[in-house]
């Protein structure tokens, strides 16, 4: 049986808070700066990782291929 702590760590990595899990070409859902109040998500493909730290509690900041910038909320397992 997994411990509760391990489950929480695994859940965080899927949610885009760890830089090591994000790479260019990955399909993700982000929250753009203008949508922070509503939490509206935008789906796109990562072009560039902008956060330099190993993790961020609100999600790793990325630039999508279409030029929009937002924080990763979820890594999408299906194709974009």
Image: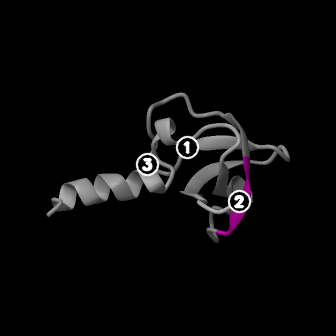
Q: Quadrant of residue 10?
A: bottom left
The residue that label 2 is drawn on is 79
x%, y% of residue 11?
Answer: 37, 59
- The residue sitting at the top extreme is 52
Q: Quadrant of residue 60?
A: top right
- Identify which residue is drawn at 61% across, 60% down: 76
| Camera-side mark, 3 or 2 | 2
Task: Say the numbered circle drawn on residue 57.
Answer: 3
* Structural distance between the alpha carbons of marks 1 and 2: 20 Å
Pointers 3 and 2 in contact (C-beta within 8 Å):
no
Judged left or right of residue 62, residue 51 is left
Q: Looking at the image, tell me whether mark 3 or mark 2 is earlier in sequence order.
A: 3
* 74 vs 36, nearest the viewer: 74
Identify the magenta region. Answer: 40-45
Q: Looking at the image, tell me whether mark 1 or mark 2 is earlier in sequence order.
A: 1
- Identify which residue is drawn at 52% across, 49% down: 59
For label 1, the SS is loop
Disc 1 crowd rating (10 Å Cα; few below 14, some 14-19, many 20+) is many
User: On screen, 41 above or below 21?
Assistant: below
Q: Quadrant of the N terminus?
A: bottom left
- Identify which residue is drawn at 74% across, 49% down: 45
Pointers 3 and 1 in contact (C-beta within 8 Å):
no
Q: Main secondary structure of the magenta part?
A: strand
* Structural distance between the alpha carbons of marks 3 and 1: 8 Å
x%, y% of residue 75?
Answer: 57, 55
The residue that label 1 is drawn on is 60
- Is 17 included in the stretch rendered in magenta? no
Disc 3 crowd rating (10 Å Cα; few below 14, some 14-19, many 20+) is few
Pointers 1 and 2 in contact (C-beta within 8 Å):
no
Judged left or right of residue 42, residue 61 is left
* Structural distance between the alpha carbons of marks 3 and 2: 26 Å
* 40 vs 25, nearest the viewer: 25
């Amino acid at each position: 049986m997994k411990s509760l702590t391990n489950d929480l760590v695994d859940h965080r990595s899927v949610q885009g808070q760890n830089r090591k899990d994000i790479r260019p070409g990955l399909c993700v859902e982000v929250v753009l700066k203008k949508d922070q109040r509503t939490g509206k998500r935008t789906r796109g493909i990562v072009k560039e990782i902008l956060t330099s730290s190993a993790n961020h509690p609100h999600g790793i900041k990325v630039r999508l291929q279409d030029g929009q910038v937002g924080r990763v909320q979820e890594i999408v397992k299906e194709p974009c």
